[in-house]
Structure formats: C-alpha cells, structure tokens
C-alpha cells in the first residue's frame, strides 16, 4: 500500500514564499506520526522513503524555527488576519477523504460489473473458490446487513444478474417455541434491499418451508433457483425450484429424507443428494439415502440412484458425469453416469461409473480441478465431534477414481475445498481446506504437500468453505469470525466479528461460506444476519 502523504499548499505574501513547502512536508510527515500503524508499515515496505520523510520533518521544523526567530528579531509583524489552520487536522481530513474516496470507488465498481451468463452453483463453480471476479477487498467495512429476528443463515449466498442489477440469493432458518422454519430470500446486492422472501410452500400460506442448510444454484438463463430443504434430523423434505425473479415456487420434488446437499446443474438437469436420518448409533433410520436427478423445466424426476448418506454436494463434469461423496455407512466417493435409465439400458451401461472407498465418511462437497477431483471427510459431522478426531482429503483421477494422493488431517474436512492457481507462469495450484480442528490448511494439489496452515479463532471449528481471491483468502470460524489471510503463507491480515454484538451465538453455527464479487464480500452468520462488506482499499501484489 502507498504511504499516505498529504501535501497542503498555502499561499501567503512574498516574504514567506517558502512556507508552503515547509508546511506541506510537516503535514505529510505529521500524518504518519499520528498513525503509528501506517508509520510502521512505511518503515517496513519503503525504508528509504520513510527515512527521508522523517528527515524532512526535522529540516522543516528547523526552518520554521529559523523563520519564527527571524521574525522576532526584526520585530516584523503581520496584520491581523484569519486564525492559522491546524495542519494536523487538515492532513487527517485529506486522508479521511482519500479513504472514503477509495471505498466509494470500490463500491461504484460493483454497479459496473457484468456478471457472467453461466450456471451458479455452491461456491460459484466447481472449483469452489467463492470468487466471482473484480477487485479484491481489504480493510473490510460493513456496507449493509439483513438481520431478521431469530434467523440463522447457514446457507451460502449466490449472486446473479437481475433486471434491476446484481441480486443476492440465500436461505435462512428460524427457530421458535412452535418449531423450526425456513425461507429463501432475494436482495439487491448493491444496497441490501429485500426484493422477495418465500417462506411458505403453498399459495394459501398454510404450509411453512422447512429450514435450509443447502445453498442455492441458479440456472444459466437466470430464471430458476434450485435448492434443497431440511436439516439433518428432518424427514419428508423437498428439492425446490423457485422463479428467480419473484420467488414463486415452480415445483417441489418430495423425498422421504432431507436434502442438505447443494444442487449441481447440468443443462436442464439438477442433481442433489438425499441424506440418511441416523440414530445415536450412526445407523440410518429407514431409507439409507440416494442421489436424485430432476428436470428443471418441469420438475419431473429423471433418475435416482441408491448411495449411502450422500450429504455431499455433487459436481458435474463437462461430459455430464456426476461426482458425489457417500457419508456414514458408505465412506466412498462415487461417479455416476447422468443419462436416462432408458439410454443406459439401450447402451448396456450401469449408472455407476466407479466407486472409490475411503477410510471415513466423505461428506464434503466435491471439487473439480483439471483431470482430478478433491473431496474431504472424517469421523465427525457439523453437530457431532469425535473424541478421537480424524479427517482426510482425497485427490482422485476423475476418469478412473484412482487415488492420486491422500492427506490425513487432524479432524474432519466437512466444508468445500477451494482450488485456485497462484498468479504468474510458475504459480502452483493450491487447495484450501477448512478443518474442524479450527485451521485452514493449504495443500499443493500436485502431491498433497502442506504449504501452510493457519488457525482462525482458537479451537473453534472451520466449517465454512474459503473464498480465494489472490492475493488473499477469506475464512470463517464457527464462533463467528471472518478472517482475511495472505494466500501465499496464511498470515492473518485482519479479522471481523460476524455475529450480533451481545448475542455471539451459542451453537457454533457460523458456517455460511463467504462469496467475493466485484469488490464486495457477502456472508451469512448465526446471529448477525447476512452481511455485505466493502473494502477501504484493493488488495495488491504485496499483500
């Protein structure tokens, strides 16, 4: 970041013509002295410039002293005029305006962005990076928040173009003495104004929606939103399709289970997992689970395939292959063909393409990176913590399911793994893994080597996926802290509390994954609602 010097020109009579330059230097350097963090940063990054600035203040002070002394000796006096300015205040005001201008520039750039006409799935795309392009914000400041009473935002936000500008879509959970309920919400991304909210499943408003853990997916034409319904102990939940413009429910595809899985979209097909409802012994009570494919245009079921507890959020390759994790009582990653049952029978093919067993339940979302996929798992879930924690990240060949490498973790990896390539011709592709132990761990995707690891908030779990926008990474701890990390080494750059002050959140359910788009960051929380941050400056290569 450039050292913030403020130069203030003042025009006086000819006898004091040198005074403007002297006072300008004094104001600039005094600004640094009044902002010790900036002074320290200037000394570290630009030692010569900082030394020169400090030397300048000594010379300027001496010059001022000399002028004042000469004035006293000669008995010269100025005619009475306006009071002399407080140069420290002038310099600080210039800096304040500069910072406000930078923030306004970051904010204005948002309205100029043209969002891509493509599908939007959990974490934006199957790299799960949560970054939609544009400036990378630092020095985060709250721009707006949507905080309905007693509502948790477990779902991760999605952004898409709307007729009146970019829109944010997300889903919430409300709990009261009568039960638990859900709602899907659409807001103006620029100001946070609500466009619509859908909380009932019928036009009469008699049937409330169930709470949401699943995150919304938006079709390429921006007309439809698809999302799963229900939490881990809920039964008889639906896969839902809503009109993105109005929030009206277009269709409901019922299941006997819950759909915590965030849908994947491929053309006119949406795919999600219906997860098992387990008892205290971790065994399924009833249906063990299945993967469901539905036609988006009319809600017709295309196919279903039995997979044990597919809580994972699936990914779909360009050839239509569906990849999804199998959770408790399954412990595997599977690849499925997505053609209709009739076409598979005619070709003599099975729906199962391959199945790779794992040591633990594979409940994390599947991430695609070139010719391989990444999936996380472990012996815990979002609510249950194992007394003997263990986790794993698997890198598999997408064509065969062959294990390229396996990296053991200190605890379960439940949230999506974000993959992003470092800038530059020699930049490596890194995988940023949120771990239930409270760390973010960066792995080299070539061999699974640990590049760095960083703890976010003590032992508070990291259950949300990271947003990766080089040169920084944004991560959220379950106790409600948003951390900004330097991507190359994991250094903590800044930290912000997401939950409501005085109501910090007792459940540890700040698990919404942040989304970065055009200089803004959007994230949900347990008690602080849905928040939008804008940066006071843009991240640069030095960060």
Image (spheres, rainbow, N blue to C red):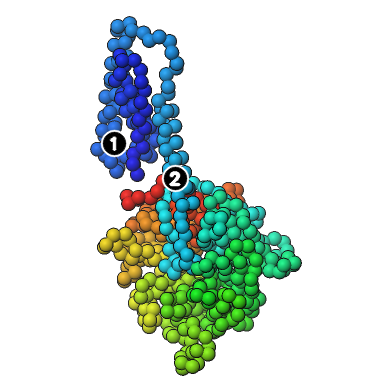
| Vertical order, 331 against 507 (above or below) | below
Q: CA distance from mark 2 to mark 1?
A: 27 Å
Please give the residue where the numbered disc 2 appears in the rendered image: 105
Q: Residue at x 63, y 64 (%)?
A: 247
| Vertical order, 201 against 286 (above or below) | above
Percent of width and height locating residue 155: 56, 63
| Vertical order, 175 against 330 (above or below) | above
- Is residue 205 visible to us here? yes
Are the residues flagged by discs 2 and 1 in contact, CB closer than 8 Å?
A: no
Q: Who is closer to the viewer here, 387 or 348?
A: 348
225 left or right of 89? right
Q: Quadrant of the N terminus?
A: top left
Q: Who is closer to the viewer here, 412 or 388?
A: 412
| Vertical order, 218 against 529 (above or below) | below
Count neighbours of disc 2 (C-alpha within 10 A) and say few if under 14, some if 14 to 19, many if 20 or more. Answer: some
- Secondary-structure class at tag 1: helix
Q: Which mark is residue 296?
A: none
Q: How many marks?
A: 2
Percent of width and height locating residue 357: 43, 82
Q: Residue furthest front?
A: 163
Please give the residue where the numbered disc 1 appears in the rendered image: 50
Q: Compare marks 2 and 1 and give the one earlier in the sequence.
A: 1
Q: Residue at x 52, y 60 (%)?
A: 161
Quadrant position of residue 150: bottom right
Quadrant position of residue 18: top left
Q: Nearer the viewer, mark 2 or mark 1?
A: 2
174 left or right of 470? right
Count neighbours of disc 1 (C-alpha within 10 A) and say few if under 14, some if 14 to 19, many if 20 or more. Answer: many
Q: Residue at x 43, y 43 (%)?
A: 102
Percent of width and height locating residue 94: 42, 33
- Secondary-structure class at tag 2: helix
Q: Residue at x 37, y 28 (%)?
A: 8
């Amino acid at each position: 970041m450039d050292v913030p010097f403020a130069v203030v020109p003042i025009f006086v009579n000819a006898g004091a013509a040198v005074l403007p330059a002297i006072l300008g230097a004094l104001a600039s350097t005094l600004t640094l002295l009044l902002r010790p963090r900036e002074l320290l940063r200037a000394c570290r990054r630009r030692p010569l410039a900082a030394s020169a600035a400090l030397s300048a203040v000594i010379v300027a002070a001496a010059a001022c002293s000399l002028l004042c002394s000469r004035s006293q000796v000669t008995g010269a006096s100025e005619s009475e005029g306006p009071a002399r300015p407080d140069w420290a205040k002038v310099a600080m005001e210039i800096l304040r305006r500069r910072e406000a201008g930078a923030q306004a520039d970051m904010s204005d750039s948002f309205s100029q962005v043209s969002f891509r006409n493509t599908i939007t799935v959990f974490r934006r795309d199957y790299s799960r990076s949560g970054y939609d392009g544009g400036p990378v914000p630092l020095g985060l400041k709250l721009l707006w928040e949507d905080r309905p009473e007693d509502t948790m935002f477990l779902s991760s936000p999605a952004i898409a173009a709307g007729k009146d500008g970019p829109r944010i879509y997300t889903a919430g959970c409300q709990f009261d003495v009568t039960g638990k309920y859900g709602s899907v919400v659409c807001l103006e991304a620029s100001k946070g104004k609500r466009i619509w909210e859908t909380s009932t499943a019928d036009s009469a408003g008699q049937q409330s929606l169930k709470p949401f853990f699943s995150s919304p997916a938006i079709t390429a034409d921006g007309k439809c939103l698809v999302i799963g319904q229900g939490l881990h102990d809920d039964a008889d939940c639906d896969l839902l399709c809503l009109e993105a413009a109005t929030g009206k429910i277009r269709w409901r595809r019922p299941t006997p289970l819950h759909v915590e899985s965030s849908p994947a979209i491929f053309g006119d097909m949406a795919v999600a997992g219906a997860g098992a409802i387990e008892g205290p012994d971790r065994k399924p009570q009833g249906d063990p689970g299945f993967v469901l494919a539905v036609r988006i245009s009319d809600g017709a079921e295309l196919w279903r395939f039995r997979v044990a507890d597919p809580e994972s959020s699936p990914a779909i390759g360009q050839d239509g292959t569906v990849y999804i994790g199998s959770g408790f009582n399954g412990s595997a990653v599977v690849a499925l063909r997505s053609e209709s049952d009739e076409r598979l029978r005619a070709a003599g093919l099975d729906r199962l393409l391959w199945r790779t067993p794992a040591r633990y339940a594979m409940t994390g979302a599947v991430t695609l990176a070139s010719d391989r996929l990444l999936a996380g798992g472990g012996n815990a879930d979002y609510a249950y913590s194992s007394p003997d924690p263990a986790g794993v990240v698997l890198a598999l060949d997408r064509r065969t399911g062959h294990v390229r490498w396996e990296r053991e973790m200190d605890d379960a990896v439940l949230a999506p793994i974000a993959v992003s390539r470092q800038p530059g011709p020699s930049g490596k592709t890194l995988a940023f893994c949120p771990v239930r132990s409270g760390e973010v761990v960066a792995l080299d995707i070539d061999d699974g080597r640990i590049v760095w690891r960083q703890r976010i908030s003590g032992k508070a779990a990291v259950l949300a996926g990271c947003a990766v926008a080089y040169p920084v990474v944004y991560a959220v701890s379950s106790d409600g802290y948003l951390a900004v990390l330097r991507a190359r080494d994991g250094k903590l750059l800044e930290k912000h509390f997401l939950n409501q002050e005085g109501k910090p959140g007792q459940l540890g359910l700040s698990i919404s994954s942040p989304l970065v788009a055009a200089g803004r960051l959007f994230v949900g929380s347990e008690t602080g609602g849905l928040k939008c941050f804008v940066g006071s400056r843009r991240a640069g290569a030095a960060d």
